[in-house]
Image: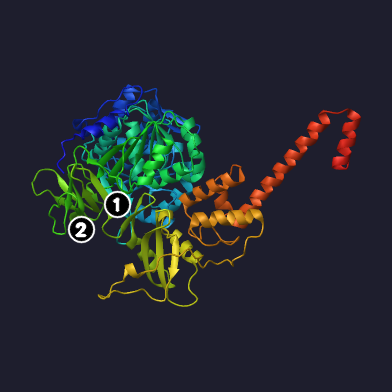
């Protein structure tokens, strides 16, 4: 797909409708890609020093304040690392501090890796050791974890205790666009995560495709719904900060999906971006007529967008545009597709559209030859804006990043994805061609889960598949052959995996088999593995039938969300296959049914039907008591003092003296 940088006329027309009301969009050119991220950011600071840059709850910084904070962090990093080319590790939760530290590391000319505090300790330790970081930058909140990770072997920098004498002016270090800027770890087929190395040029090219594709400008307020250290979080953060827009942070895991709509409205967000699964859950819970007047763009990427996602967009967001992007950590954005309320989607698969500027998309057969239109081929990307390769994995880099046969500075990246191109040039994304799958927007290597699960002492063999449930969403199903009887419980296996893998890589369903089916060539016959049938898994708790009306309603909600036939009142939601996104859906259903605000943390603290039933009953009793007292007081106010005394005595059994 030769790319001229121009979109078809109808796509240009739809894109033109998403101009910000201020009309102050400024195109980012390919020539501007050839600089460093700090250089672009400092230009924006000069233009918009007093504008809001980052907002997290009640905390916020202007561009000038963020720049000065980042400069002080950069000088503190240099004071400890000097001119060393060692990687710098950033240990933060999703926060304003994380963004300031990211900019500080880049201003110091360093390569950084962001460690997610929600990851299992073993996974974080591996990433820290593999990156060979010599310094951990953190804050007071995460200092205990940082000390545990450092083990007195690595230097620590607490940004809450910076030397007051550190200067806050720009460092003006000469940083080339081809210098490595970030390592992002993704799931690896070896059983351990692999690091993708991005330089400033690669990041700024993706920034360009977001800016020009969505007409981002300084008047935008951009929602950041994931950690700034993820590929999507990094792109979203820079899409705002390198344009003079405001980054508004919302932690879905902590604050709950049920509160997202009110937050978007109160923060006057104009630009929403997330994985399709999160948008699907969010939009499905919206009530009829709920509006978001400032919202002008919804951007979905990192997973396959479905036709019903477009229908949800049209139903609830008639006054904005939907942008679909196809991307990979190694390539950045490669395709874009603009949708408005008039766009018709002919099939269940939503096109990912047309190549962005600077990207050429190839569809190859098994021999590496290009296929024709309407034929399925492996997606390869030719560009000069690819990642540098895989950190400390020259063998993997060589196998996935190929030199361009036509010469020059372009390379070809083999994505491992399948696609099909229409005659008009639109690309259709058909998913992974191997065991690498997308779960809730995250790229997951099935082999890694199988490898970790197979290390459990009670497991003889394990196979993991990504299956679609009744709603069409993918979930991980683990097939386990135990070494002995009794077999390990689901609870035991989940606890074991949680120590080594992030939440999205924990299978939702475990099926125990006497043996795995084999094909004629002796390999595991994955097609012969049984489909989950909704049977309640073998957990440690004994099944107890719900008795009260509240318990019965909650058990029905549990079963509906988890796609199970039945749920006992003492069954743990997470042992039954629940995860963070399913938790937000369940809480939304409970709020709708019982009409009171319930924070998402309530499910983590009370993850059984019995425990949540007790919470609801207590709330109802308290509410009934308040209602009764209000009726008594209203009656007392309407009668004489003597009559009031008699009423109170009859109702309460005593009279206050």
Please name the colour scheme applied to the rendered image: rainbow
- Dot 1 lies on which element? strand
Q: Looking at the image, which residue sits at the far left?
A: 406
What residue sits right under mark 1 in the picture?
Answer: 195
Q: Is residue 583 above or below residue 479?
A: above
- Dot 2 lies on which element? helix
In the picture, measured across the screen, residue 199 lies left or right of residue 257, that is left
Report x, y in % for residue 76: 37, 37
In the picture, measured across the screen, residue 405 lies left or right of residue 196, that is left
What residue sits right under mark 2 in the picture?
Answer: 395
Q: Is residue 531 above or below residue 198?
A: below
The quarter of the picture where the N terminus appears is top left
In 3D space, how far apart are the residues under numbered discs 1 and 2 (Cα atoms)? 13 Å
Report x, y in % for residue 13: 26, 30
| Precedes in sequence: disc 1 or disc 2 | 1
Report x, y in % for residue 147: 45, 50
The quarter of the picture where the C terminus appears is top right
Report x, y in % for residue 234: 34, 40
- At 14% across and 56% down in the image, what residue appears? 368
Q: Nearer the viewer, residue 603 or 62?
A: 603
């Amino acid at each position: 797909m030769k790319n001229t940088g121009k979109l078809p006329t109808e796509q240009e027309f739809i894109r033109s409708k998403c101009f910000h009301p201020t009309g102050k969009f400024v195109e980012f050119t390919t020539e501007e890609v050839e600089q460093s991220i700090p250089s672009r950011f400092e230009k924006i600071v000069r233009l918009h020093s007093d504008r809001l840059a980052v907002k997290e709850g009640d905390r916020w910084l202007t561009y000038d304040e963020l720049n000065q904070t980042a400069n002080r962090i950069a000088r503190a990093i240099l004071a400890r690392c000097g001119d060393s080319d060692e990687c710098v590790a950033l240990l933060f939760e999703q926060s304003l501090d994380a963004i300031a530290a990211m900019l500080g590391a880049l201003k110091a000319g360093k390569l950084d890796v962001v460690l997610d505090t929600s990851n299992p300790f073993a996974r974080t330790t591996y990433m820290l050791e593999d990156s060979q970081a010599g310094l951990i930058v953190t804050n007071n909140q995460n200092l205990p974890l940082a000390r545990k990770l450092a083990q007195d072997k690595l230097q620590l920098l607490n940004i809450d205790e910076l030397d007051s004498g550190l200067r806050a002016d720009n460092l003006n270090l000469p940083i080339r666009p081809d210098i490595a800027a970030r390592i992002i770890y993704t799931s690896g087929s070896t059983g351990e995560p692999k690091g993708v190395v991005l330089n400033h040029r690669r990041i700024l090219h993706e920034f360009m495709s977001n800016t020009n594709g969505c007409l981002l400008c300084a008047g935008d307020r951009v929602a950041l719904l994931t950690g700034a250290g993820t590929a999507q979080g990094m792109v979203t953060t820079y899409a705002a900060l390198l344009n003079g827009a405001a980054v508004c942070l919302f932690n879905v895991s902590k604050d709950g999906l049920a509160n997202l709509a009110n937050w978007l409205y109160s923060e006057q967000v104009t630009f929403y971006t997330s994985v399709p699964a999160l948008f699907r859950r969010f939009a499905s819970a919206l009530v009829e007529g709920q509006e978001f007047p400032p919202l002008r763009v919804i951007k979905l990427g990192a997973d396959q967008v479905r036709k019903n996602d477009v229908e949800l967009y049209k139903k609830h967001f008639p006054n904005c545009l939907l942008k679909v992007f196809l991307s990979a950590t190694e390539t950045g954005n490669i395709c874009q597709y603009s949708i408005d309320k008039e766009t018709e989607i002919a099939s269940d698969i939503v096109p990912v559209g047309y190549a962005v500027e600077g990207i050429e998309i190839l569809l190859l057969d098994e021999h590496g030859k290009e296929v024709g239109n309407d034929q399925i081929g492996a997606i390869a990307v030719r560009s000069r804006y690819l990642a540098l390769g895989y950190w400390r994995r020259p063998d993997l880099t060589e196998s996935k990043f190929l030199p361009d046969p036509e010469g020059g500075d372009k390379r070809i990246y083999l994505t491992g994805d399948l696609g099909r191109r229409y005659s008009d040039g639109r690309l259709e994304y058909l998913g992974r061609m191997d065991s690498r799958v997308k779960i809730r927007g995250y790229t997951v290597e099935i082999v890694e889960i199988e490898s970790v699960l197979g290390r459990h002492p009670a497991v003889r063999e394990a196979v993991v598949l990504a299956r679609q449930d009744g709603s069409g969403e993918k979930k991980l199903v683990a097939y386990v052959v135990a070494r002995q009887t009794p077999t390990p419980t689901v609870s035991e296996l989940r606890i074991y995996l949680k120590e080594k893998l992030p939440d999205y890589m924990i299978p939702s369903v475990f099926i125990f088999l006497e043996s795995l089916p084999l094909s004629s060539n002796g390999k595991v016959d994955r097609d012969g593995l049984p489909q989950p049938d909704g049977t309640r898994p073998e957990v440690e708790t004994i099944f107890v039938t719900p008795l009260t009306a509240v318990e019965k309603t909650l058990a029905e909600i549990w079963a509906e969300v988890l796609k199970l036939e039945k749920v006992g009142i003492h069954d743990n939601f997470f042992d039954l296959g629940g995860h963070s996104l399913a938790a937000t859906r369940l809480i939304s259903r409970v709020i709708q049914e019982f009409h009171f605000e319930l924070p998402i943390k309530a499910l983590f603290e009370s993850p059984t039907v019995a425990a949540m039933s007790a919470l609801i009953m207590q709330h109802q009793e308290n509410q009934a008591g308040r209602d009764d007292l209000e009726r008594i007081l209203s009656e007392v106010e309407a009668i004489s003092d003597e009559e009031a005394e008699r009423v109170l005595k009859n109702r309460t059994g005593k009279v206050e003296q």
